[in-house]
Each structure stands twice: as structure tokens, then as C-alpha cells.
Image (cartoon, rainbow, N blue to C red):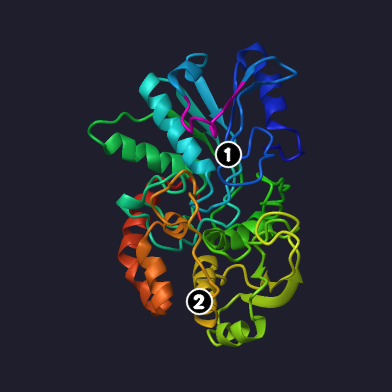
Amino acid sequence: SVSATLRSARDILRERCRSRLVALFGPQHGIAGEKQDNMIESAHGVDEETGIPIFSLYSETRTPTPEMLSRIDTLVVDLQDVGTRVYTFEWTTALALEACARVGVKVVILDRPNPLGGLITEGNLVRPAMKSFVGLYPVPMRHGLTLGEMASLVNERLRSHARRVAADLTVVRVSGWRRRMLFDETGLPWVLPSPNMPSVSTAMVYPGQVLLEGTNLSEGRGTTRPFEIWGAPWLDTRKFLRRFERRGLRGVVLREHAFEPTFHKYAGELCRGFQIHVTGARSYRPYFTTLAILQDVIAVHPDRFEWRKEPYEYVKDRLPIDVLTGDPAVRIALEKGRSLTQLEESWIPDLRAYRKEARACMLYEA
């Protein structure tokens, strides 16, 4: 996290707080954002310049322990979220909020813009039985909230739960941001919050393309355009594209693109695939688009396409794709070739209820 002039948030807090800054907490990808992938943990450590402890919240624990919190009276959260439910920064914040509520530590969130804007929500809600570290609360994939608003939503749910305690939460609002604004319209610099989120363009496609992590398709890790680039050595691009283009989806063009990942799936192999070009950011629907991609790949390659079976975000008893979508019905609809429009229409009642609840926690005007 950095200021508008690219100064580190850590350095600014150290300058402002001096000896009152007594601990640092790191989310997934490490305190410096260096760790590459899912389930690559960070160790606890010590900050070399200040000598204060660094506690990893993506280690043997994803929740700050009472011992960690015993050093502080206020936890300051400053993270650039990406507006997608499976990006774990918001759930690290939620777990920290719950932990701070239990021990009476205040939480202050220095809010940042949602890079996708705050007007559009997209996708299904997480089913209660599918709760995980990429979906601790029932929200859609593209949730339309800032990190501060999401924390407020979580806190209100804690408040309404008979046996749980809400945190003493303060959200410092972003000055000048409005819900209709995409990140490119803020004038702020983009600094990659994790290794495979190098640009705002990545964040734009991520609510859909992250689903490829649950498949044997490369999501472009090991390339310079992760999530924008995707494919596999066995993909028949021409046959797939003919099918996909018949859908007439708005705001997006798939350009054929061959690539060789330097690591991760198919490292060193020639992959045939595409780069996603978003031609209309306000009409493009990333979640629906990737569902369409997956359904068409399954139809073209029923013998080659596979759902990954390895544990995903510490969940061992469910397919990664079901953990990602939060509802096995989505996978079943893709496998059976059911209408995605009808699937999306089935989510409308849940989305309406979510928007009504979220509206009470919104801090910014359209």
C-alpha cells in the first residue's frame, strides 16, 4: 500500500506514530506482496528497520491471535482490494475484525477505491455450506464495495448475530471517490497488491478468470499478463472461438494468442489460447464471460478439459471450482450446457437482497 506520491504506508505510519507503531500484520502474499500463489504461506518475522514483530496472517493462522493483539489498542488496515470476492484481503480483514471484537481492540480502515467501481454487482452468492477463506460471507463474486464498506457489512452482521460481538470500527473514507469511478479515473498510481495482479486490466478480468484456477486451463500465471492470457496446449482455438463469438457478448474481444508459461501450469510448453481485451469496461461482465468460456471449452473438448482436484485454500473435501464459485450448481450448469442467461436470472432474488443489505453500508455516492 502506498500514498498518492508512492510513499509506503508503513513508512508514513512509522513517521506519524513513531514509537506507538508496535507490530505489523501481513495478509496473503506476504508483508511485501512477494508470495506467488494459493497456499504458499509466509513466516512471522521482525521488521529490519524498526525491530518490531511482523505477524503473518497467512501462516498457521489466518486470524490474529489474542497474543498478537495484546500488544496493540488499535489495528490499522490499509490494503488495496480488487473488488472480487475470492481475493483474500477482505476475508483477512473480516477475520481480524472478528478477532479484534472479541478482545476489545479498535479497528481503523484506511479505505481505498474499488478498482471496478461500485455500481455493478455480478454473480451468485456463496451458499452457507460452501463457506471458505475465499468466501466467508454470502456475497457475489463482483460485490461492488470498497474494503471499508465490506468491513462495515461484516460488522453489521456481527452486530445482528445474537452470540457475537461487533468491533469498534472506524472507516476513513476515500476523498473524492464516487461509485461510478473506475480506478483509471482516480488519478492514483496502481501498485500491484500481489504478484499476479500487475495492472488495473488484470483486476478487471479477475472476477471471471480466477475461475480458471479450478481447471486444467492455464490462467496465464507465468506470463506477463496473468488472467488476461489463458489457454492450454490442447485447445482448438478456432473451433472454440466460432462457438464463443456466437454469444455476442458485449465489451470484450478474445484475440488468439500463443504463449509459454515460465512457471505454474504447462511451464515451458506452448499453449494455444487468447488474450482478453476489454473494449467496454462498463458493459463487460467478467463473471458471465468466463462462465461462457468454460462452458464452450467443455463443449469443444469434453475429453481434455478437467476440473482440478487438489486442495484449494485449505479446503480438501470440495472441488476447487465449487470453492471458487461458492455453489456447485454453477459447475453442474456448465457441465450440462444449461442456459447461462437462465442461470444468471436465478441469482436475481439473492442479489436484490444482498444489494439492499449492502446499501446500508455504502459510504460513497454514485
Q: Is residue 58 magenta?
A: yes
Residue drawn at x 54%, y 41% is 89
Q: Position of residue 331 (x, y in %)?
A: 41, 67
Residue at left offset 65%, top offset 70%: 232
Establish if 336 lies above or below 142. below
Write down the quadrant of residue 222 in the picture: bottom right
For label 2, the residue is 298
Categorize mark 1 by other alpha carbons within 10 Å: few (<14), some (14-19), many (20+): many
Front residue of 93 and 360: 93
Residue on which the image places disc 1:
28
Q: Is residue 130 left or right of residue 217?
A: left
Magenta stretch secondary structure, dominant: loop
For the residues labelled 2 and 1, the Cα–Cα distance comes to 32 Å
Residue occupying the far left of the picture: 162
Which contiguous range is marked in magenta? 54-64
Position of 8 compared to 137: left or right? right
User: What's under tag 1, amino acid-wise?
Assistant: Gln
